[in-house]
Image (spheres, helix red, strand yellow):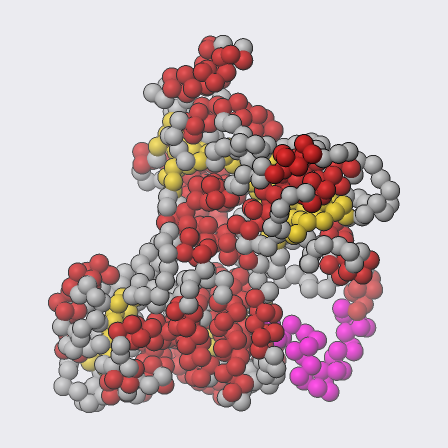
Amino acid sequence: MSESNVKFSEAEAIDFHARGRPGKIEIIASKPMATQRDLALAYSPGVAVPVKAIAEDPGRAYELTAKGNLVAVISNGTAILGLGNLGALASKPVMEGKSVLFKRFADIDSIDLELDTEDCDKFIDAVALMGPSFGGINLEDIGAPDCFIIEQALKERMNIPVFHDDQHGTAIITAAGLINAAHLTGRKLGEMKVVVNGAGAAAISCSELIKCMGVSPENVTMCDSKGVIHKGRDDLDQWKSAQAIETDDRTLTDALKGADVFLGLSVANVVTGEMVKNMAKQPIIFAMANPDPEISPPEAKKACPDAIIATGRSDYPNQVNNVLGFPFIFRGALDVRATAVNDEMKIAAARALAELAREAVPEEVSAAYGETKSFGPDYIIPAPFDPRLIEVVPAAVAKAAADTGVAQKPIVDMEAYRKQLAGRLNPTASTLSLAYEAAKQNPKRVLFAEGEEDNVLRAAIAFKEGGYGIPVLVGREGTYDKLAALGVENPKDYEVLNSRNSPMVKKAVDFIYEKHQRGGMLRRQVERMVNQDRNYFTAAMLALGEGDAMITGTTRPFSQSLAQVRTVIDDESGAEPFGISVVVGQHKTVMIADTSVTERPTAEQLAAIAVRSAAFARRMGQEPRVAFVSYTTFGNPPGVHIEPLRDAVKLLDRMTTDFEYEGEMGPDVALNHEAQRKYYPFSRLSGPANILIMPGLQSANISSKLMKALGGESVLGPYLLGMSLPVQIAPMTATSSDLVTLAVLAAGGADALRRSPSSAIAMAARDQVG
């Protein structure tokens, strides 16, 4: 139950789902399939061997097939998000999205299945018959009361976890927040009076879970659209009647008098400030209706300043976001081969989340949200991108499964398991997510130099509507017309600077002329440069403080754009610019430098690149391990053009560094730690390299472009480091999405991502001999 404050156009959403390979998921073989022998092992006749093994011992399916890491996301589309019953096919984008979240947050493979039936029996039969295929079943967007019937029947018929996230996901996150809110206000769960507004799947699940955790059933009052659900009503189905209590209260207003807690899973604006005032002191208010809560946090705070408030929205504190729960619950359940997700496992997840929120918040999480996060009224639920979630929640769930006897393969070494969990995900993915959050918390003005190009305009629109900052388009008179054609309702809301007639033209000319007049550049030459080429004008605007960052590059080669920018903006003191490309996989990140600037770097330049690349890697969530890469490994085979690499290593040896480095070595050795240990035990790297410093521009640029063209991994950048001001130059092939990422990093994180090389490099270079 969550609502993002990220905005986008309908056209952008359609384009996101349609471009390239349609949809959001694909199936990729996890074993090589290149040769006839590979195929023979994968299918006939090799496949007969695991078939016989599984027939003899069904448990080996978890060892020999994908079953143990495969979840089915299943819906019939009868309750899609807040859109209602739109049918099975219409639910497919949501189910694909859920599959993506499973992979992104918990490294769980997932297949979406949309069943075209509203007949509960048919639905149940269909899912139950697919049990052998999956390690778990995630039910989604199924209307009440069918969701209760379906889940219960499948739990009874299947020997794998069955979990309806719309019910239990919300309940678990709510319970975690409630634990901490009670802690802050000195309440005991067993003594709290709770009012639940709404009687759907999530509301009933919340009610049942908090009762399991110790809230007294007679202290939980549930309301539906007709008022309080009490014993005297004769219009209740079996699920509502189970929530009925003896009470004289008949309305929500009655029920909230003296209540400690309000859990809203209903509709907007049903609670007033006066109703909040009538609650107990320090009331706990979870207003989770989407997109608008039952009462807005500002209104609730005005009525009761000491209230603790949570919502389903990301633009208020304490977001109840299901992504904090379901990926990690299934991760723990799958890893112990659980036969169910029981109440004890749900409670363990809730308690783990509550405890995590009480711990010191990682610096990168606080930085992303623009403030120091610490346990308190505005931080009772962990942030969705907290990198510790993958380690903490699955471990708690796995232990609870073992303690309650539903784990077929309990974890023997819990500490080793936690370490294994921490290594399942690529930390760079979380870091990039946090960079987007940081941009929203501290929006900056970003100058888009090529403000007439369609993909640049799309990027500017996404940047603005996403809340990441203020785009300033450097364009011509027709820019507003193009914005309108792309679906912008109010094009004049966008700022456009025209390098021919802007009042800033004279200032730009003055700035550049003063900078170069003693270098032979004439004023009329500068005037032509500014009027005719937007890179000069945009760079001058950045230098004059009219923007916080600059994006360019889509209309001309990288080298040409860089030369124009460097005419106006200086290099970082004591440094030279270079480009670093980031190859982001599911489990690891590899960075390649220099992919864009220097054709044949010297040893001093290579050492400087290594130092700044290591700092960049840390900002991207990686502990840097640098390899100076060549076609030869420690002189084998003998080669030429390797002396700068060797000298760069010597240069770093004379410095005080805080990262691992080694070389020269081939990429096959650099990226294979087993090979390093076997053949080169003297290697100083403690693991596979994650920064590859290339001997020259050709090898670096070709390598990164091959990776991007061949696919299989996401290649970001190149990111330009070493400029005195935040400038990013996109490749000509950049998509609008690539440009948004560059803009976010340039605006929200560029100053932090740029690092000056240690002056020790220059000193060591002067002392270097041969």
Whether residue 222 sits left or right of residue 475 in the image: it is: left
Instruction: Tell me the quarter of the image containing the N terminus.
Output: bottom left
Instruction: Tell me the quarter of the image containing the C terminus.
Output: top right
Q: In this view of the protein, can residue 564 be seen by the observer?
A: yes
Q: Main secondary structure of the magenta part?
A: helix
Q: Is residue 125 above or below residue 461?
A: below
Q: Is residue 535 above or below residue 446?
A: above
Whether residue 565 sits left or right of residue 578 in the image: it is: left
The residue segment tinted magenta is 42-69
Which residue is painted at 66% across and 84% down in the image? 59
Whether residue 190 sits left or right of residue 373 in the image: it is: left
Whether residue 630 sits left or right of residue 22 in the image: it is: right
Q: Dividing the picture into quarters, in which one does residue 366 lie?
A: bottom left
Which residue is painted at 78% across and 39% down in the image? 642
Q: Residue furthest front?
A: 767
Q: In this view of the protein, can residue 710 be seen by the observer?
A: no
Residue nearest the observer in this picture, 744 or 532? 744
Which residue is painted at 68% across and 74% down in the image? 65
Residue nearest the observer in this picture, 96 or 368? 368
Q: Is residue 68 magenta?
A: yes
Q: Position of residue 23 (x, y in %)?
A: 53, 56
Q: Is residue 618 above or below residue 382?
A: above
Q: Dividing the picture into quarters, in which one does residue 631 lie?
A: top right
Q: Position of residue 223 (x, y in %)?
A: 23, 78
Q: Is residue 145 above or below residue 93?
A: below
